[in-house]
Image (cartoon, rainbow, N blue to C red):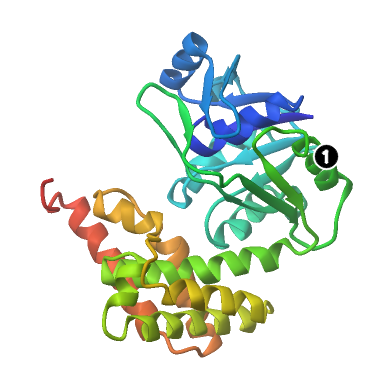
C-alpha cells in the first residue's frame, strides 16, 4: 500500500512512521526545511511502544505526482484550504483521503474538492509532539486511529488499511461501519470541553471545583448531545454516563488543545468546532447562549492576537 502523509509532525510522523514499519510504502509531503532535517537525521520516534529511527522518503510540493492509495491528512482545521491545494496533484481515481482533523466541517469541504467517493471519515486519539530537533515524541499510551466509509459499512479499501495497521507497532487501529457516529461522539465531548475550558480558561477539574461548574458542564453536554441527535446521531446512554462522570471529576485535569493554543497566543480552531456547533444548535433549535458566548470569546481573542495586543509572556 502506498501512503502519502501530509507532514511529518506529531501525528503524520507518528502514524506514517508506524505504517512504514508495518510494510507500507510511505512518503511525507513536507516543506524544504523539514525535508533537509529528515534526510539528515531520518524520522525519529520516541514512544512507550518502542523507539525508532527510520529512513524517510520525502517530497516537496513541486515533486508530488498521482499514484497513492491513501493520503493521510493531519493538519489543523485552519490549514485545510492550504492542505487541499498541497495534496491536489497527488489525487487520482485510486486515492482515498483519510482526514483525522477535529470536528466535522472538513468532510464536506474535502468532498466538494475531490468528490464524495474519495473521502473517508477518521479520527485519531494520540498525545504526541515534535521537539525542536525534529523528534516525534509520543507522550502517553494513546495511539488510536479509527476510520471508515462516510456512507457506512466496511469496504475493501478500509479493510485493507486496517489489515496493514494491525501489524503496526504502537498503533491501535480500527475500521468501523459507523464512522460518522464515532465522529459525532468525539465532537460532542470535544465541543463540550472546548466551550467550558475556553469560556472559563480552566481545565475540567478546576471547573468542577467551582460553584455551579459541574451543572454548567452537564448542561453544555446535554445541549451538544441534542445537536448530535438532531443530525441523526443520538448519543448512547453509556457515552453520556462516561462524560457526565468526566465533567464531574473534581480531580480531573483535562484541558483542550484549543485552550492550550489560546493561552499560548496561537491559532485556534474556533470556526471548525465552536462555530460549527453554534450553527448546528441554531438549525436544531437548541438553546445556543453558551455556544454563542464561547464563539464570541474565541473570535475576539483572534482579533486581539492579530492586532498584536496579547499580554507578553
Residue found 32% across the figure and 51% down from its top: 261
Q: What is the residue that sits farthest to the front in this orientation?
A: 251
Along the line of sight, the residue nearer the viewer: 162 or 101:
162
Above or below residue 118? Residue 94 is above
Which quarter of the picture shows residue 185? bottom right
Residue found 69% across the figure and 31% down from its top: 19
Q: Work out whether residue 144 can be spotted.
A: yes
Along the line of sight, the residue nearer the viewer: 146 or 92:
146
Location of the C terminus by quadrant is: top left
Which quarter of the picture shows residue 233? bottom right
Residue found 80% across the figure and 63% down from its top: 152
Residue to which mark 1 is pinned: 163
Q: Work out whether residue 234 can be spotted.
A: no
Above or below residue 282? Residue 161 is above
Q: Position of residue 5 (x, y in %)?
A: 61, 32
Q: Position of residue 209 (x, y in %)?
A: 30, 76
Q: Secondary structure at mark 1?
A: helix
Q: Position of residue 63 (x, y in %)?
A: 59, 19
Above or below residue 176? Residue 99 is above
- Relative placement, left or right, of 274 versus 146 is left
- Relative placement, left or right, of 267 versus 226 is left
Location of the N terminus by quadrant is: top right
Residue found 38% across the figure and 29% down from its top: 131
Q: Position of residue 134 (x, y in %)?
A: 42, 23
Amino acid at each position: 500500500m502506498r501512503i502519502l502523509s501530509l507532514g511529518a509532525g506529531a501525528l503524520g510522523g507518528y502514524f506514517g512512521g508506524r505504517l512504514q514499519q508495518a510494510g507500507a510504502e510511505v512518503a511525507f509531503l513536507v516543506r524544504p526545511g523539514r525535508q533537509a532535517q529528515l534526510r539528515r537525521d531520518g524520522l525519529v520516534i520516541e514512544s512507550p511502544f518502542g523507539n525508532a529511527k527510520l529512513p524517510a522518503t520525502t517530497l516537496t510540493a513541486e515533486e508530488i505526482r498521482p499514484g497513492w492509495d491513501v493520503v493521510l491528512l493531519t493538519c489543523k482545521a485552519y490549514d485545510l484550504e492550504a492542505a487541499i491545494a498541497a495534496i491536489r496533484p497527488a489525487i487520482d481515481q485510486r486515492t482515498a483521503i483519510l482526514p483525522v482533523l477535529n470536528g466535522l466541517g472538513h468532510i464536506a469541504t474535502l468532498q466538494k474538492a475531490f468528490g464524495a467517493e474519495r473521502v473517508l471519515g477518521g479520527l485519531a486519539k494520540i498525545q504526541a509532539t515534535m521537539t525542536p530537533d525534529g523528534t516525534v515524541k509520543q507522550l502517553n499510551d494513546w495511539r488510536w486511529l479509527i476510520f471508515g466509509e462516510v456512507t457506512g459499512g466496511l469496504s475493501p479499501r478500509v479493510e485493507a488499511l486496517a489489515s496493514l495497521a494491525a501489524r503496526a507497532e504502537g498503533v491501535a487501529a480500527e475500521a468501523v461501519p459507523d464512522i460518522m457516529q464515532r465522529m459525532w461522539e468525539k465532537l460532542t465531548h470535544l465541543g463540550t470541553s472546548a466551550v467550558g475550558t475556553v469560556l472559563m480558561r480552566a481545565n475540567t477539574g478546576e471547573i468542577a471545583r467551582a460553584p455551579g461548574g459541574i451543572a454548567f458542564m452537564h448542561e453544555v453536554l446535554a445541549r451538544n448531545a441534542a445537536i448530535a441527535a438532531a443530525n441523526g446521531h443520538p448519543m448512547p446512554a453509556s457515552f453520556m454516563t462516561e462524560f457526565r462522570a468526566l465533567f464531574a471529576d473534581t480531580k480531573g485535569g483535562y484541558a483542550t488543545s484549543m485552550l492550550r493554543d489560546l493561552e499560548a497566543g496561537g491559532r485556534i480552531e474556533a470556526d471548525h468546532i465552536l462555530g460549527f456547533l453554534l450553527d448546528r444548535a441554531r438549525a436544531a433549535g437548541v438553546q445556543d447562549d453558551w455556544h454563542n458566548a464561547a464563539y464570541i470569546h474565541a473570535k475576539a481573542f483572534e482579533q486581539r492576537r492579530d492586532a498584536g495586543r496579547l499580554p507578553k509572556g
